[in-house]
Image (cartoon, rainbow, N blue to C red):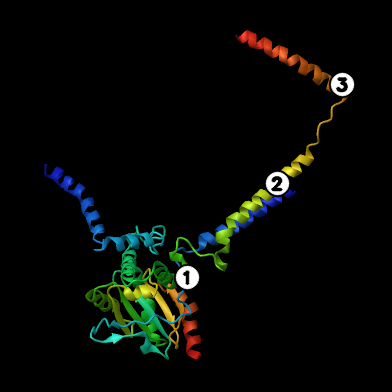
Amino acid sequence: MMRFILPFVVFLIMAAFMYVGLGLNPHEVPSPLVGKTAPAFTLPQLHEPAKQFSPQDMKGKVWLFNVWASWCTACENEHPVFLELSRQNLVPIYGMDYKDKREDGEAWLRKHGNPYALVVSDAEGRVGIDYGVYGVPETYVIDKQGVIQHKHIGAVTPKILDEKIIPLVKELQAK
Amino acid sequence: MKKCLLMLLLCLLPAFAYAGEAKDMAADPVLEKRMIGLAENLRCLVCQNESLASSHADLAEDLRREVREQMQKGLSDQEIIDYLVSRYGDFVLYDPPVKKSTLVLWYGPFALLLAGAGMLIYQLRKRKSQVPEAELSAEEAQRAASLLEETPASSNQSKDKQA
């Protein structure tokens, strides 16, 4: 009897590992920045390049930081989610136009709508590197102390927004 | 004829593509070499099976630029690696450090090897105890002895035949 049970148990263990392993998304690299202070930067605003923005301006507020670009197709998919969220006035959304031409970014927002309280322009992608951006879109939830509490890689779906981001934002706002 | 010429021109295109790649070479070849040496041990996050040195992804180019600039500032290789790890995690390293979360990665194969060797030894021992030494009766022993005596002669005969 043992000679059948043992291989079967080994098979079950391997099958369990493979089931979990194959279900993982290799493109989701856990960010070491979660739990750390959002890296400081000063960038020109997209619409008014003369004005600048820096995350320190947001101290005392919970906010979302969404990295997007006009060349990014997944951004088009998540955009309606942010448009809807901005209508609810739950949390300010700040955008960063990543490795993009100013005109292209502005044109994209005119076409698809602008859910952002403010957009900064990271034309060279340097701030992106500081934030560990490797695929757009990426979205960060930053708390009142300026600490990154959550990072979402890839397009935000209504499900992720309702189940993860909004509850987290409410919890952080209550603190 | 025109078509042929066009085809020939198209064949030249890859050469230009390569020229585009070469523009990355900085003015300082020593620094460039050091940068490539470091980038070969770092993983590109976009195309994950390529190193930062060989990847053509936009992000890889930016990261190479970042590494180059930090080298120009006089940072050591370790400081640059630490910077990248603090941004992208151990994932950027092809040679991840030994720590709690990577114990299985580092020692798992050896554990499996040991377990396999243990199983093998256990099975072999068990098999040995299952097959008893054959005991011959007096009659069988005699027969065996006579067969052994006969064999050399008969084999010689067969050799003769072959020759």
Identify the image quadrant of residue B138: top right
Mark 3 or 1: in front is 3
Left or right of residue B143, residue B122 in this image: left
Mark 1 or 2: in front is 2
Asked whether the viewer can see residue B18, the reply is: yes
Report the amino acid beneath label 2. Ile
Q: State the image coordinates of residue B153 (x, y, percent, origin top left).
A: 72, 12
Reading the chain from its start, which is encountered first: label 2 or label 3? 2
Q: Name the residue under label 1.
A: A30
C-alpha distance separating marks 3 and 1: 77 Å
Nearest the viewer among A152 and B155 is: B155
Q: State the image coordinates of residue B19 (x, y, percent, origin top left).
A: 22, 56
Q: Which chain carries label 1?
A: A
Q: How crowded is mark 3: few (under 14 residues within 10 Å), some or many (20 or more)?
A: few
Residue A158: numbered disc: none
C-alpha distance separating marks 1 and 2: 41 Å
Residue B121: numbered disc: 2
Q: State the image coordinates of residue B18 (x, y, percent, origin top left).
A: 24, 54
C-alpha distance separating marks 2 and 3: 37 Å
Q: How crowded is mark 1: few (under 14 residues within 10 Å), some or many (20 or more)?
A: some
Mark 1 and mark 2 in contact? Answer it, CB < 8 Å. Answer: no
Label 3 and label 1 in one chain:
no
Nearest the viewer among B159 and A118 is: B159
Q: Mark 3 lies on which chain?
A: B
Q: Name the residue under label 3.
A: B139
Report the amino acid beneath label 3. Glu
Residue shown at 47%/70% (left/top)?
A: A30
